[in-house]
Image (cartoon, rainbow, N blue to C red):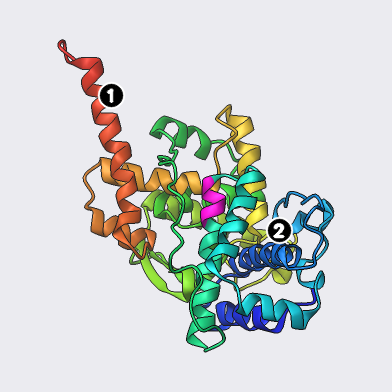
């Protein structure tokens, strides 16, 4: 993609100074790509009557016919438009997103991307003021995170065949996710040296390259030991990536997409809700921890949440469950 110099500098700032993951940086780039394409259409003299295609996921932007947004306009002209953007132009962009039936959460994410971009530009002296200072984020629907009941968790954990290398790996992955609440990106980034079998903890590399130590259950460690034993006995072991904890069938680093595919496979085999994602196991970890008496601050630390308000979302699940139990059990409810 032929990036505008200002956009390119911002994305490098995210990657190398803020240590954003490649996936997150890619999402920011896609949002900015769409915004740049829009302002090039919105500029004086542009063809405003041209139908605006709906953007799909970042990878499918080109397939929807818009081309690369940053290649639509002359770079000098686009640079001027970016620098001179005002609140009215931002509002027109938000109106366009509404007209294209984007969800409130998606619009809020795109707005957050623009906030970050223009804050960066203001700090570097590229813009005289932040055009988003008077723009409010759309009020979003409150969605409670989904989680699995313990019976469902146990059913899922018992599904992989632990006598095979991939089955033993998958059982260990599922155990680790539920035992520690790690994000799937953190799971695939785990190294063999990160597991401390003696102290029963793991070292997790979280967002922004922040590291944390998380306790891990004996059952998860047992599954890890079995996986590592099966892995060591494999005839191809000498060619496996000796650094990474979880490897693919070729013995190399595992991808987050592979974890999702494996989870889908076991959900189907166990007859569980196919909408469950790896992040649902993280939600399940937090919900069961709080439901069994763990304090909020400790769960925040284990999840690697920067703000405790993010962790407090799970208390709403518990309050809802208490209310449901009350309504079902109390004779006057």
Residue 209 coordinates in the image, percent (x, y): 48, 75
Residue 89: in magenta span: no
Label 1 and label 2: CA atoms lie apart by 40 Å
Question: How many tags in the picture?
Answer: 2
Name, please, the residue furthest toward the bottom. 125
Query: In the visual, does 94 lie left or right of 310?
Result: right
Name, please, the residue furthest toward the left. 332
Closer to us: 127 or 225: 127
Q: Is residue 301 visible?
A: yes
For the stretch drawn in magenta, what is the main secondary structure? helix
Report the residue marked by disc 2: 58
Residue at horizontal 77%, vertical 51%?
Answer: 52
Q: Which residues are magenta?
A: 104-108
Residue at horizontal 62%, vertical 65%?
Answer: 23
Closer to us: 160 or 229: 160
Badge 2: residue crowd in 10 Å (few <14, some 14–19, many ≥20): some
Residue at disc 2, secondary structure: helix
Q: Quadrant of residue 73?
A: bottom right
Q: Is residue 164 visible?
A: no
Instruction: Looking at the image, tell me whether mark 1 or mark 2 is earlier in sequence order.
Output: 2
Position of the C terminus by quadrant:
top left
Q: Quadrant of residue 84?
A: bottom right
* In the rendered image, the vertical position of residue 196 relative to residue 184, given as above or below: below
Closer to us: 100 or 113: 100
Foreground mark, 1 or 2?
Answer: 2
Position of the N terminus by quadrant:
bottom right
Residue 198 coordinates in the image, percent (x, y): 35, 66
* In the rendered image, the vertical position of residue 143 relative to residue 55, given as above or below: above
Q: Quadrant of residue 263?
A: top right
Residue at horizontal 64%, vertical 76%?
Answer: 82
Report the residue marked by disc 1: 324
């Amino acid at each position: 993609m032929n990036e505008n110099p200002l956009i390119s500098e911002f994305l490098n700032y995210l990657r190398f100074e803020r240590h954003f993951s490649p996936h997150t940086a890619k999402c920011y780039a896609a949002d900015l790509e769409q915004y740049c394409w829009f302002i090039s259409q919105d500029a004086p003299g542009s063809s405003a009557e041209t139908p605006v295609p709906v953007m799909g996921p970042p990878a499918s932007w080109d397939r929807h016919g818009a081309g690369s947004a940053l290649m639509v306009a002359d770079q000098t002209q686009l640079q001027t438009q970016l620098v001179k953007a005002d609140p009215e132009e931002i509002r027109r962009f938000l109106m366009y997103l509404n007209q294209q039936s984007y969800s409130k959460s998606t619009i809020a994410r795109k707005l957050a991307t623009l906030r970050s971009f223009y804050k960066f530009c203001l700090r570097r002296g590229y813009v005289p003021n932040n055009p988003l200072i008077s723009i409010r984020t759309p009020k979003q629907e409150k969605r409670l995170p989904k989680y699995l009941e313990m019976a469902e968790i146990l059913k899922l954990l018992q599904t992989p065949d632990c006598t095979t290398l991939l089955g033993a790996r998958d059982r260990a992955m599922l155990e680790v996710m539920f035992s520690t609440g790690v994000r799937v990106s953190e799971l695939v980034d785990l190294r063999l040296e990160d597991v401390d079998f003696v102290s029963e903890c793991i070292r997790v590399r979280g967002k922004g390259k922040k590291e944390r130590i998380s306790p891990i259950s004996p059952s998860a460690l047992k599954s890890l030991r079995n996986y590592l034993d099966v892995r060591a006995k494999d005839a191809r072991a000498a060619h496996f990536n000796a650094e990474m904890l979880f490897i693919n069938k070729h013995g190399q680093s595992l991808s987050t997409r592979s974890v999702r595919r494996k989870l889908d496979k076991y959900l189907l085999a166990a007859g569980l809700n196919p909408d469950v994602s790896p992040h649902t196991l993280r939600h399940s970890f937090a919900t069961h921890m709080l439901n069994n008496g763990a304090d909020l601050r400790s769960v925040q630390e284990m999840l690697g949440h920067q703000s405790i308000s993010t962790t407090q979302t799970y208390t709403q699940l518990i309050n809802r469950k208490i209310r449901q139990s009350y309504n079902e059990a109390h004779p006057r409810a």
